[in-house]
Amino acid sequence: MRIVKEAEERRNEILDVAEALFNQQGYDGTSTNDILKKVGIARGTLYYHFESKEAIMDGIIDRYNKKVIEGAQAIAGRKEIPVIERLLMAITSLNVSGAVSEELMTHIHKPQNALMHQKIQKVLLTEITPIFTGIIQDGIEENIFHTAYPYESVEMLLVYATTILDDGMIELTEEEQSQRMKAFSFNAERILGTEQGMISGQLMKILTKE
């Protein structure tokens, strides 16, 4: 008996299978035939949802971006958490490499796929910045942050956090990573106009919890 699935359910099934195959065989080593066989659908059904293997990869990235945005909104809305801790929790939750498999990150960071990585970065900056700005505004109201540029301050912090601190973008030793985190805290305190040591102290607590 033929099983008919709802469009969204079928789309997610294709993405789940494709992502698993990309992880196992590599993006270049996986064909649309592999995906068809694993899902158990006709080629026409696949093309109804995705016109190519590249479109499937875009779908995986779009789904990741949606998950990141929802996670950021959830953290930003937790008003019971102190402002600085909430901000750092939100920023550390954006680690691209921690949410996408190593195989997919390798593919995304290839020079020929620069537009793919740019797509992730664009979503982070345009969708996440307003969410995080709300946290900064809370800090300003509580007299913790002192900046006339809350939105722009978030942009600066996000650009650094999602490029320099993204494991897939730049290879850093553990010592270099630690140095970058210290510099991030140091400069974040000045950008946001908060008391020295407040961000670095909270950041160390979050990292040690992990």
Image (cartoon, grey):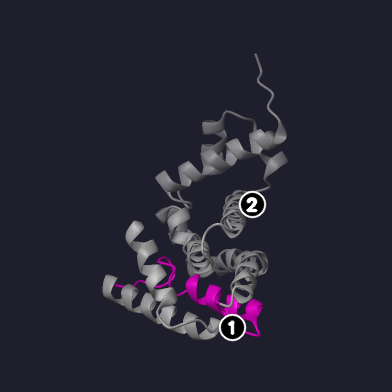
Q: Is residue 91 above or below residue 70?
A: below
Residue ID at (68%, 47%)? 51
Place of residue 196 in the rendered image (x, y in percent of width and height, measured from the top left): 42, 83
The percent position of residue 52, horizontal first and vertical second, equals 64, 49
Q: Residues within 10 Å of mark 2 (few under 14, many from 20)?
A: few
Range of magenta residues: 144-173
Numbered badge on residue 146? 1
Check the picture and name the quadrant holding the C terminus: bottom left
* Residue 202 visible here: yes
Asked where in the image residue 206 lies, by quadrant, the reply is bottom left
Q: Residues within 10 Å of mark 1 (few under 14, many from 20)?
A: many
User: Which residue matches tag 2?
Assistant: 55
Real-space Cα distance between discs 1 and 2? 44 Å
Amino acid type, mark 1 = His
Which x, y percent locates residue 36?
Answer: 57, 35
Q: Dot 1 lies on which element?
A: loop
Q: Is residue 139 above or below residue 78?
A: below
Kind of residue at disc 2: Ala
Image position of 140 (left or right of 170): right
Q: Secondary structure at mark 2?
A: helix
- Residue at the (33%, 79%) spot, across then down: 179
